[in-house]
Image (cartoon, helix red, strand yellow):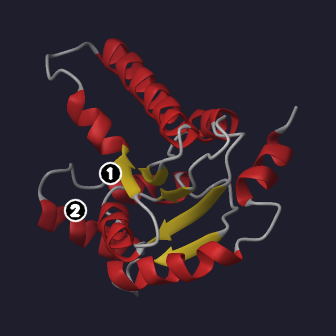
Amino acid sequence: MGDTAGRIIFLNGTSSSGKSSIARELLDILDDEVWFHVGVDMFNAMRTERAMAPAEFDEALKRTRRGFHRSIAAMADVGNNLVVDHVLSEPWRLADCLEVLRPYRVLFVGIRCDVAELTRREAVRGDRPLGVAAYQADLVHRHGDYDLECDSGKYSPRECAEQIKAFLPNQAAPTAFERLREAIRP
């Protein structure tokens, strides 16, 4: 890790929970330094669209996620501040992030939204299969520990971003990532 590692705000929530909208608002209001929004969907969009057998596709997704996690570390290592947008719907994803991002101070933010609103947003978007967000709703938050949680069904993306900005300088130690590492340590 470099001498001047960047800060990481890590947004975790279901598909259609508003993570990308909140990230864009954060980039607008975090004007003290340069920040980058890096999202797992951005990495998915870089992958070839050729047809793959289910097992091959699953393996490609896993490599994509692992590469995404390591890119976060690489960007932070050279001093870039990051707003990360992710869906931690499988336990290995969180475990990998906890290990790969061990050297960095991470503000772990849970983006919550009730299932009825998630379903409405999916239908309006039309670019995701209906039911994915509802399926992910319990999975992404099952680890049960965040530094901060925002309700994107109750608050606008801008209001959620303002909550995160206000919390950022007041993050207590140990962080949620540190507590989670300790909780899952063998």
Of 80 and 170, nearer the camera is 80
Whether label 1 touches label 2, CB < 8 Å: yes
Does the rendering let one see residue 35?
yes
Residue at the spot 33% in from the left edge and 12% down from the top edge:
56
Residue 132, disc? 1
- In percent of width and height, residue 17 lies at 36, 66
The residue indicated by pointer 2 is: 122
- Image position of 143 (left or right of 40): right
Left or right: residue 41 compared with residue 2: left
Residue displayed at 33% across by 84% down: 156
Crowd rating for badge 1 (residues with CA inside 10 Å; few <14, some 14–19, many 20+): some
Q: Secondary structure at mark 1?
A: helix
User: Against 186, is 51 above or below?
Assistant: above
How far from the left and from the top, in percent, is residue 171? 71, 71
For the residues marked 1 and 2, what is the alpha-carbon distance in whole angstroms?
A: 8 Å
Quarter location, residue 172: bottom right
Q: Residues within 10 Å of mark 2 (few under 14, many from 20)?
A: many
Q: Is 127 on the left-hand or right-hand side of 142?
A: left
Q: Which residue is pictured at 68% across the width and 53% down the height? A: 105
Where is residue 153, by image quadrant?
bottom left
Q: Amino acid at mark 2?
A: Glu
Q: Is residue 17 visible?
A: no
Q: Secondary structure at mark 2?
A: helix
Could you say which is closer to the camera, residue 33 or residue 76? 33
The N terminus lies in quadrant: top right
Where does the C terminus fall, quadrant-wise? top right
Task: Classify residue 59 as left or right of residue 7.
Answer: left
